[in-house]
Amino acid sequence: MKIAILGAGMIARTMAKTLRGMKQRGEDVELYAVAARDLSRAEAFAREEGFQQAYGSYEEMLRDDQVELVYVATPHSHHAEHMKLCLKYNRPILCEKAFTGNARQAEEVLALAKEKGVFLTEAIWTRYQPARKIINDLIAEGEIGTPRVLTANLGYSMMEKERVFLPELAGGALLDLGVYTLNFASMVFGDDVVRMESSVGMMDTGVDHTENISLYYADGKVAHLMSTAFTNTDRRCVVYGDKGRITVDNCNNPGVIEVYDNSYSGVPVKTIHVPEQITGYEYQVQCCMRDMAEGKLECEEMPHSETLHIMRVMDELRAQWGMVYPFD
Ligand SMILES: NC(=O)c1ccc[n+]([C@@H]2O[C@H](COP(=O)([O-])OP(=O)(O)OC[C@H]3O[C@@H](n4cnc5c(N)ncnc54)[C@H](OP(=O)(O)O)[C@@H]3O)[C@@H](O)[C@H]2O)c1
């Protein structure tokens, strides 16, 4: 599959490394094209990362009929605009998280993709990784009894990154980091949330730097989530049940999953290491290839309904905080 990258920033480099690794393993991916707003930067990226074509405008790349999947790697604020551009040329899309700047934009893009019959999925990598099934299987097998409470945190020191502190680039910790803790809670506890409480710390620029979010579920479960763009955190998630707990070392890319009983011995009764990975990004690309080959328009790991649900939750949280983006 000929893959093109739209936007030659930081995460585009991770995708390039992933695709090289997949190709080396004999998987059917071609590092085909990259587009940046500046041709010389696109050419430098293509040269350094091993892409065949470089384009100095996104639209020019999208006119190229050989492009089979476009990875959108621009700031959240611009995802809707760039996905609509992809859809203008009927190009299948894997779009970085957060899917859009708000739920209205997500609804528009998803409706357009449906109308045009073009494949589209969100690049929220944790949804596609093997850790998800490992955690859900442990719970289903009764390893911790009945799950009751979970905690998850994700923090990185990101204050030097322009798109994180600017409202016009849909900045803030929620869309960059909170989106992972919300997705973790959704993957483990589902979406039947009856009450959501939160508190927030805001930057002078009008976007959030740190938040606590509590989700209360219809069946009595509770999820406590924390995200921050101020500082690195341990990124740990814990699912507590009446017979024990599951710990996950990294909400953003799980590596080690442990099960503890209620004895407080400090020794896990089970330790599971996730399979060796290239970057952890390969799973979402593999899911795109699998589902596109089957003629599907979305990935079962992250259906459009889930993408929209998470966007609506983030809109509601921002409404609680009085946090508005200029494009809202
Ligand atoms: N899954 C993950 O672990 C992960 C990690 C980091 C980021 N992300 C996501 O990836 C996306 C990009 O993040 P990043 O950290 O790679 O950002 P970045 O380094 O700032 O790069 C963003 C790119 O977007 C393009 N762009 C287009 N219009 C722009 C505008 N008006 N202002 C600024 N940039 C613009 C630029 O590409 P050109 O100038 O080259 O055209 C820029 O290189 C975000 O959605 C982010 O949440 C995901």
Image (spheres, helix red, strand yellow):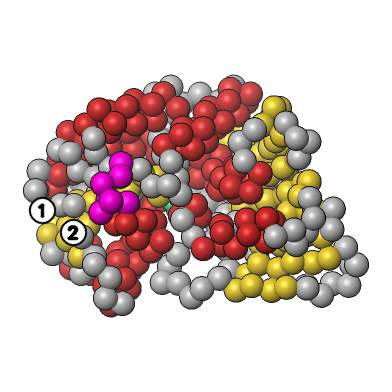
Say left or right for 220 vs 227: right
Q: Secondary structure at mark 1?
A: loop
Which residue occupies the foreground of this view, 59 or 271? 271
Is the residue 50 above or below the residue 56 in the image? below
According to the image, label 1 marks what residue?
66
Q: Which residues are magenta?
A: 291-297
Q: Amino acid at mark 1?
A: Gln
Residue 262: give x, y in percent of width and height.
88, 63
Q: Residue at x 23, y 35 (%)?
A: 117
Residue 161: give x, y in percent of width and height.
45, 49
Say left or right for 318 vs 19: right
| Marks 1 and 2 close (CB-CB < 8 Å) | yes
Is the residue 144 above or below the residue 82 in the image? below
Is the residue 138 above or below the residue 312 in the image? below
Query: In the picture, which quadrant includes the C terminus?
Result: top left
Q: Residue at x 39, y 26 (%)?
A: 107
Q: Amino acid at mark 2?
A: Lys
292 drawn magenta: yes
Are there few (<14), some (14-19), or many (20+) residues within 10 Å of tag 2?
Answer: some
According to the image, label 2 marks what residue?
2
Quarter where residue 192 is shown? top right
Q: Residue at x 51, y 55 (%)?
A: 126
214 drawn magenta: no
Gap in angstroms between the C-alphas marked 1 and 2: 7 Å
Q: Secondary structure at mark 2?
A: strand
Residue 172: give x, y in percent of width and height.
53, 39
Q: Is residue 76 visible?
A: yes
